[in-house]
Image (spheres, rainbow, N blue to C red):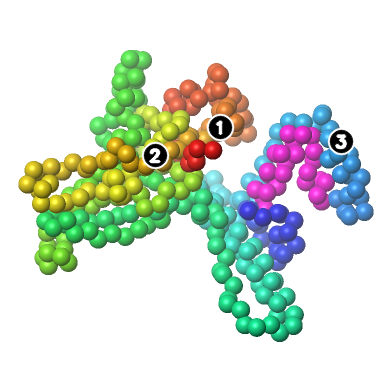
Amino acid sequence: AHPYQCCEALKIGEASCLACEIDKLLLEHFGSSVGIDTIAALEEKSNDISSTLVTNVVVPSRENCGHPVIPSNFLAEVWKHSSVRHLARHDQHDAQEFYHAFIDGLETDVLSYQKTLLSMQQAIKCQSQIKPLQPPATPPQSSIKDIFEGSLRSVLICDQCGCKRSQTESFLNLSLPLKNEFPSQSEVASREKMTTRRETSNITACLKDFTDPETLSDPIYCPSCKRKSKTLKQHTFAKLPRVFCLHLKRFDAENNKKISDFVSYPASNLDMGKYLPHWCEKVVSKESKDSDSNEIDVDAESPKVLYDLFATVNHRGTLNQGHYTSNVKCGNHWYHCNDAFVCDAGEGNGEKEVLLAEGAYMLFYLKNDGK
């Protein structure tokens, strides 16, 4: 989001900045790929910087190529950050909760940096010669939420006249309930039954269940009919984010259990276009009521909005205790991350093992722009 040295020069106090720490990690990663200690080079004093650049940049050390990036400083700054500090204890915490806190903290730091730059620019203008009045500067806009934040459209539909009332709600991740009829992993022992289960329980079924209209138990007042009437409620997607996070709701606090159902999901070409309002939203008309049809007519030519999987978070354990691991795609290869240990996810590029892994909890997809 911004160079860490610029931010440190403007920073007041000792507050940590998540955007700066990410910038440092990226510098270390790309420097390691060619044998350059980028952080050391940037932090050298001005009288020594020229020699450092000659040894580390012009003539990179092949012996230092490929050294692993150790994100200990990054993690320390994360746990000290005001938005994440409440999670920095030995209690059990939800990965989804950490994700929200981290994105919120990252956005706060980016906006703070942009506001500081804007105030400095305004101060410089005030010190300069008097100029004609100009329109006020545009408030800083967050680039973080543009990447990670989507928008849900929640609509109430009168079953009598078809009148719709809608509102939008932003989301960082989409929480999908798991259908009760999916068999649990302990109920399936043989390989043949596992194959059948994967064909039954999949992310497409969860998305369809989430976007299907449901009839509310109580009638709702319709401003068009001027009376209470049977009402349908439906969720569709008003805006799809670039990074789309799906959260499988495995923790059932009401029944004090963890849902261990296996849910299959695609590694590529997850099509979200058919869940946009125009192609998914229920239309109530006289013709449909006469035919007693509650089917949603999904146009075969709905736009293709495709997503490719690039990371997963998996949970092993129970409702009250457990362990998180992750799988990350780098290039065309999958890596398994378990605390400080990182290894190949499996044979070949590891994709098969990732898709068959137990306890998928959060799925991260990147929009495929066809580039």
Q: Secondary structure at mark 1?
A: strand
Distance from disc 3 to disc 2, alpha carbons, whole Å, reads 47 Å
Left/right of residue 276 with respect to residue 165 in the rendered view: right
Percent position of residue 34, x then y:
77, 34
Distance from disc 1 to disc 3, alpha carbons, whole Å, reads 31 Å
Question: Disc 3 marks which amino acid?
Answer: Val
For residue 59, the mark is: 3
Percent position of residue 89, x then y:
55, 49
Residue that carries the numbered disc 2 in the rendered image: 304
Q: Secondary structure at mark 2?
A: loop
Q: In percent of the image, x 75 and y 56: which residue is there?
A: 5
Percent position of residue 2, x then y:
67, 55
Q: Let me know if residue 321 appears in the view.
A: no
Residue that carries the numbered disc 1 in the rendered image: 329
- Asked if residue 348 is positioned above or below residue 56 in the image, the reply reads above
| Main SS category, magenta section | helix
Which of the two residues, 215 or 294, is positioned nearer the viewer here?
294
